[in-house]
Amino acid sequence: MRPPAAIAAALIGATLIAAAGCGASDPPKTNEIVDSMPWSSAEAYTYDLVNSKREKQGEGIISIVPQGDGWVISQQFSDPDGNADRSVVTVARSLLPIAGRRTIVSVDENRREELTTSYGDLNDGSHGVQIRQQTYK
């Protein structure tokens, strides 16, 4: 490497390290995700889950429902044995998340797992997500 190129590479590296260190504890500003919603009313779609032989193994339902000034978006997948995976998130009109929940039911393992999320101001004054996970047997 020629000396000027080495100096330039060192300066670029130092600049990147300094930039990464400055404001590293400051969370990025949250921006709007969308300006307007592509939905005007509730929608739901049901899908068959099939194996490689096209035999039905379960179903999936994806939906969006207006609620207050926002929306509730959900997806649920299940099989005939009672196993299920359901996720629900409440979002603002801009699609920024407010709260969520995911529940996984495993009949074979006699287990239910729940993961809840809430978005907002944290104890340290920053903005972020709080996550709580619980497993029931």
Image (tube, rainbow, N blue to C red):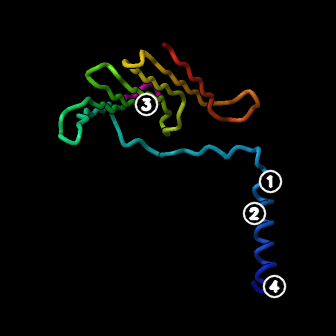
Work out whether mark 2 precedes mark 3 in sequence or the reverse, and give the earlier one.
2
Residue behind mark 2: 16
Pick whichever, 65 or 119, lies toward us.
119
Mark in the foreground, 3 or 4: 4
Query: Most extreme residue toward the left, as rendered?
Result: 54
Kind of element beneath mark 4 = helix
Does 106 appear above or below 75?
A: above
For marks 1 and 4, give the CA distance: 28 Å
Label 1: how many residues lie within 10 Å, few (<14), some (14-19) or many (20+)?
Answer: few
**Residue type beneath disc 3:** Trp
Q: What stretch is highlighted in magenta?
A: 65-72
Residue 3 place in picture, x, y as percent:
81, 85
Q: Is the magenta stretch mostly helix, strand or loop?
A: strand
Q: Are the residues flagged by discs 1 and 3 in contact, CB closer than 8 Å? A: no
Query: Most extreme residue toward the bottom, as rendered?
Result: 2
Q: Quadrant of the N terminus?
A: bottom right
Question: What number is the disc on residue 22?
Answer: 1
Kind of element beneath mark 3 = strand
Label 4: how many residues lie within 10 Å, few (<14), some (14-19) or many (20+)?
Answer: few
Pick whichever, 13 or 41, lies toward us.
13
**Residue type beneath disc 4:** Pro
Q: Quadrant of residue 47?
A: top left
Residue behind mark 4: 3
Residue 107 place in picture, x, y as percent:
37, 18
**Residue type beneath disc 1:** Cys
Q: Are the residues flagged by discs 2 and 4 in contact, CB closer than 8 Å? A: no
Pick whichever, 4 or 105, lies toward us.
105
Residue at 24% from the left image edge and 31% from the top image edge: 57
Residue behind mark 3: 71
Residue at 37% from the left image edge and 43% from the top image edge: 38
For marks 3 and 4, give the CA distance: 58 Å
Residue at 26% from the left image edge and 30% from the top image edge: 59
